[in-house]
């Protein structure tokens, strides 16, 4: 749209050279939240492509987001592959009004447009696993969490783990941050999770190590599967006269360091019997709940 004012000059130059002018089309501008012009000089890194690459955005997802700023295919759909965008694009779909790129410079949680983050999460959650894994590998490598066996003997476990934990992730960075506990014993405990799932239930300081003892005994000669884990945990919960959620949520915090995530039965199985027992007996987070 900025070039509407000089388009007529370009047409005159073509005509003066005896060349048929091409057809010109102009896109609407992308505006900042205050409806001012979006620019790197004024708004800094939020408008830089490398910022999104470094923050863990997938190129395909961000391209999809940008394509819908000022254009639409005229249908109730927002996720498009590059092939679909090319196939469906038409000048008739270009909006006449300017697009607005929403972000809040003073709020780190809303540093970029919510829709961009949502779309990136959709791609991470739904894209074929074999297409996602090549992006996860360098992220884990950069955080020193990668192991060569993830492409060898441990490949089935690695693939299942990534498929399990990606459901709640927003960027590739989440695999090395929120997902760190699946790949390393060196992970942090979210203070809010400790407060919510451990501090409120002092009995867990003895119950969770007892659950570890129960796991060690019960799974000495039976498969460590979700079905069997559920049976053991439910029986243990009934014995303690508490709610299943109290045990499950407390265990989630000790095993993963966070308050939310995939099905806890899946977490137990994915973390594995040995690591589960070790973490349930650990006093690292429990000591913070005194």
Image (cartoon, rainbow, N blue to C red):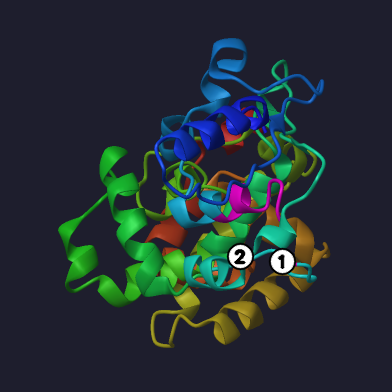
Say what secondary structure mark 2 lies in: loop
The residue closer to the viewer here, 65 or 139, is 65
Quadrant location of the C terminus in the rendered image: top right
Q: Is residue 67 magenta?
A: yes
**Mark 2–mark 1 contact, CB under 8 Å?**
yes
- Which region is colored magenta? 64-73
Left or right? Give the position of 244 relative to 52.
Answer: right
- The quadrant in which the N terminus is found is top right
Comparing 78 with 111, the one in front is 78
Residue that appears at 61% across and 35% down? 190
Which residue sits at x=55%, y=37%?
A: 11
Disc on the earlier residue, 2 or 1? 1
Rendering coords of residue 136 (x, y %): 36, 55
> Which sits in the foreground, 241 or 48?
48
Query: Where 193 falls versus 191 (above or below)?
Result: below
Residue drawn at 55 percent across, 27 percent down: 47
Residue 87 placed where, x, y %?
55, 73
Report whether 59 appears left or right of 97. Answer: left
Q: Secondary structure at mark 1?
A: loop
Q: Is residue 6 left or right of residue 275?
A: right
Q: Which mark is residue 89?
A: 2
| Residue highlighted by disc 1 | 73
Q: Position of residue 201 (x, y in %)?
A: 77, 44
């Amino acid at each position: 749209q900025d070039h509407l004012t000089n388009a007529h000059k370009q047409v005159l130059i073509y005509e003066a050279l005896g060349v048929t002018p091409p057809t010109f089309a102009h896109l609407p501008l992308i505006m900042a939240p205050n409806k001012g012009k979006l620019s790197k000089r004024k708004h800094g890194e939020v408008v830089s492509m490398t910022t999104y690459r470094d923050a863990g955005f997938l190129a395909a997802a961000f391209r999809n987001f940008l394509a819908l700023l000022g254009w639409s295919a005229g249908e109730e759909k927002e996720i498009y592959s590059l092939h679909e965008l090319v196939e469906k694009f038409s000048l008739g779909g270009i909006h006449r009004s300017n697009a607005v790129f929403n972000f809040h410079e003073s709020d780190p949680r809303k540093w970029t447009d919510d829709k961009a983050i949502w779309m990136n999460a959709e791609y991470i959650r739904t894209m074929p696993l074999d297409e996602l894994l090549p992006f996860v590998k360098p992220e884990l490598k950069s955080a020193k969490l990668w192991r060569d066996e993830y492409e060898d003997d441990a490949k089935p476990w690695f693939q299942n783990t990534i498929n399990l934990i990606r459901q709640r992730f927003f960027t590739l960075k989440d695999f090395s941050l929120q997902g760190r506990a699946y790949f390393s014993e060196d992970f942090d405990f979210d203070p809010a999770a400790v407060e919510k799932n451990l501090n409120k239930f002092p009995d867990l300081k003895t119950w969770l190590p007892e659950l570890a003892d129960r796991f060690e005994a019960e799974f000495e000669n039976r498969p460590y599967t979700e079905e069997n884990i559920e049976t053991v945990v439910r029986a243990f919960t009934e014995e303690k006269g508490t709610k299943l959620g109290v045990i499950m949520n407390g265990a989630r915090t000790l095993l993963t360091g966070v308050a939310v995530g995939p099905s806890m039965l899946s977490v137990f199985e994915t973390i594995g019997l040995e690591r589960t027992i070790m973490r349930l007996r650990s006093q690292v987070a429990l000591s913070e709940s005194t």
